[in-house]
Each structure stands twice: as C-alpha cells, then as structure tokens.
Image: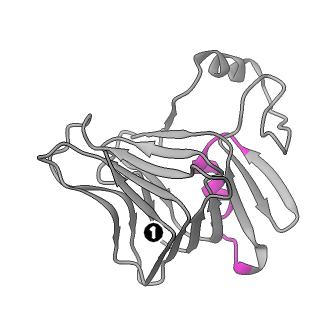
Amino acid sequence: MEFSVTGDASLAAQAEECSEHTFNLETAQCACGTVAEARVKIGGTVACYLTMEEAFLAVENCTAEDQAVITMMQDRFVVANANWEPLIIKSGVFTLDLNGHILSGDDLETNVLRIRGGDVTITSSVPGGEIKIDHNSGSLDGATCVLRATGLSTKVTLRNIKITLTSEETKMTFAVVSDAADMTLDGVTVDSE
C-alpha cells in the first residue's frame, strides 16, 4: 500500500537527503530536520517511526505485559491510498496517545481510523488531542464516521479526547461506529462544525 503524508515540503526534501534517520527519542526529530510521526515504547525499548502505519505494525504482536504506547509527535492528515483506505489497526494491545495532536482526514472511504482487532486505548496526555473528519471535500455521497471498530474480539477505549465532525447537510457523519466486542467512551467530547 502507498500512503502520503502532508507537511512542510522543505522537511520532505531534507528527509530525502538523510539516508538513515537517527531520531532524538524525546523530540522524535532527526538531525536533518525530519520529525517522526510516532514514538513507540514497548516495555523498556523506545523507537521513533516516520509514519503511523509503521508504528501500528511495531505493536501488532504486543500483549498487556508489553505496556506498549504509541505517542503521536505531530499532527497527521490521512491521505487515502489507491484503495481509499484509512489508517488501519489490525491487532495488538496498546495505548495510542494523541499527545495533544490532531489525527484527521477527509472522505477516506468511510472513516479516518479503523480498528479491526486488538485492545486499543486512545487518549491524550496533553490537552487538544483530537480525531476529526471533514466530510465536505470528498466525492463520497454516503455516510462516514471518524472511527470504526470491528471484530468480535476487538476492545476499544476512548478516553479524554475530542472527536470533530464537519459535514454538509446532505451527508451523514457519525463520530464512532462500532460492532466491536467492547467499546468504552470516557470523557470524550463530540463536536460538529
């Protein structure tokens, strides 16, 4: 699958010049100026990943004992790949800390983030953590949602985050759609613009 990341064009050019990134684990920044999208802690090991997709792959086999945490290090606008797929979490037991950042997209098939398995807690350790969708700019005519959780063994906890929906009157937009085994919302604010 191919994914695109939006951001500062000068940083993208610098990233191409750097053959192997060495990230500062606190700031997730390489000497070339590139900032990783995510910092991942599994047990006592910390690593930075250029994309959220790479971070999700890193925690796919984690269990509760690993105490895995993915911390967003910058805002991420999800651009659909050729299959119109959003960000996908397939498995793993971990916490996704939005860290005050915004995970957003527009008209990505039906959602920004899809959780297909695992035990995932989405929270923000810093105020301002948000997942949002802009359902105005795309071409889809049907309903869409910010987050979708599926799977009979999937467990999702949303804690202390904001979900924002932007939609035209003729389009239906939902905050969360779930047929997961277990979903908990605690301190979640839903806003529409």
Secondary element type, mark 1: loop
Q: Quadrant of residue 29?
A: top right
Task: Give how far across and how far down residue 187 sits, in percent.
Answer: 51, 69
Task: Give how far across and how far down residue 98 sits, in percent.
Answer: 61, 53
The residue positioned 66% from the left and 21% from the top of the image is 11
Q: How many marks?
A: 1
Q: Quadrant of residue 41?
A: bottom right
Relative to 125, is 22 on the left or the right?
A: right
Q: In which quadrant of the rendered image does the C terminus lie? A: top left
Q: Nearer the viewer, residue 53 or 129?
A: 129
Extreme-left residue of the structure:
170
Task: Give how far across and how far down residue 109 sits, in percent.
Answer: 29, 49
Residue 107 in view in this figure = yes
**185, above or below 103, in the image:** below
From which residue to which does the magenta span run? Answer: 49-64
The residue positioned 52% from the left and 65% from the top of the image is 90
The residue under label 1 is which amino acid type?
Arg
Density class for disc 1 (Cα within 10 Å; few <14, some 14-19, many ≥20) is: some
Asked whether residue 56 is drawn in magenta, I would say: yes
**149, above or below 143, in the image:** below
Coloring scheme used: one colour
Q: Nearer the viewer, residue 31 or 121?
A: 121
Relative to 8, is 137 on the left or the right?
A: left
Q: Nearer the viewer, residue 81 or 94?
A: 94
Where does label 1 land, which residue? 116
Asked whether residue 8 is drawn in magenta, I would say: no
**31, above or below 110, in the image:** above
